[in-house]
Amino acid sequence: MRRRLAAAAALGVVTIALASCRRDMQDQPKYKDLRGSAFFADGRSARPLPEDTVARGYLAADRRFATGKVDGQPIAELPIPLTKELLARGRERYGIFCSPCHGLTGDGLGIVVQRGLRRPNSFQIDRLRAAPVGYFFDVQTVGFGAMLDYSAQIPPADRWAIAAYVRALQLSQGATISDVPADARPALDSPQAAPRAAPLVPNEEEWREHPIVPTAVPGEHAR
């Protein structure tokens, strides 16, 4: 019995000794920021990246996809297939990043505008309805006017999804019966199809002459 107790005690001591010999990560050999090095000829521990190094996922080989432009001009067609899934993704991303200013329908009356922020143009003005889809991608990438760029927050694929959804918003606010596929038109006459009022779509000249000035939310001061 005594031998067993002695063996158990010895095993415990060895285990504790081994555990105490580990080296924490903060104590391991490494170079700290801007610390010199005798290993490299230039004395710098921070090494420059090899020429032509590109971070994974950032190789902009397809310039149309990466910039939305050809020869400095916005492209007129999506560089990726237009699918239902793409529009669903665009609707989701638009709701997160764009609707606070531009509103859910693109009228420029988002919640922050209603609280006093400068109102952006409606997507229904003549200039934006005529703009190529690459223009909307470029504005998200580099910003425009009071709008900062969103290139750090929104990856290129999602910027194209949003641009496609903006086009869908423009179409939805001025759609006619001819825009509805013939086989889907009977559904418009069903009892479940609720009537919708025609939207007010000002052109750019009307927008400049009669801007809608946002008011403060009751109980708060406009910023």
Image (cartoon, rainbow, N blue to C red):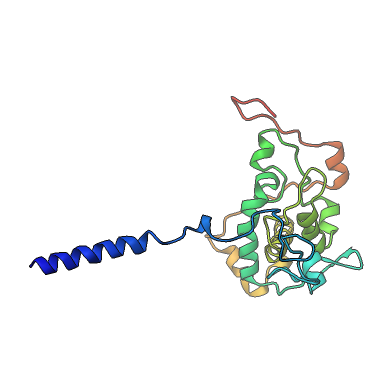
Position of residue 218 measured from the top left corner of the image (x, y, whole percent) = 60, 27
Residue at 70%, 33% in the rendered image: 116
Number of numbered discs present?
0
**Residue 53's quadrant in the figure?**
bottom right
Residue 133 is left or right of residue 2, and the answer is right
Q: Is residue 137 left or right of residue 27?
A: right
Q: Position of residue 222 (x, y in %)?
A: 68, 28
Q: Is residue 108 above or below residue 83?
A: above
Residue ID at (30%, 64%):
15
Asked if one can make out residue 196 in the rendered structure from this viewpoint, the answer is no
Is residue 44 in view from this perspective?
yes
Position of 213 relative to 124 (above/below): above
Is 221 situated left or right of 6 in this image? Answer: right
Extreme right residue here? 71
Q: Residue 75 or 106: which is nearer the viewer?
A: 75
Image quarter where the C terminus lies is: top right
Residue at (82%, 45%) from the top-left corner?
145
140 relative to 59, above or below: above
Where in the figure is residue 132, as x and y percent of width and height? 83, 62
Quadrant of the drawing holding the N terminus: bottom left
In the foreground, 99 or 125: 99
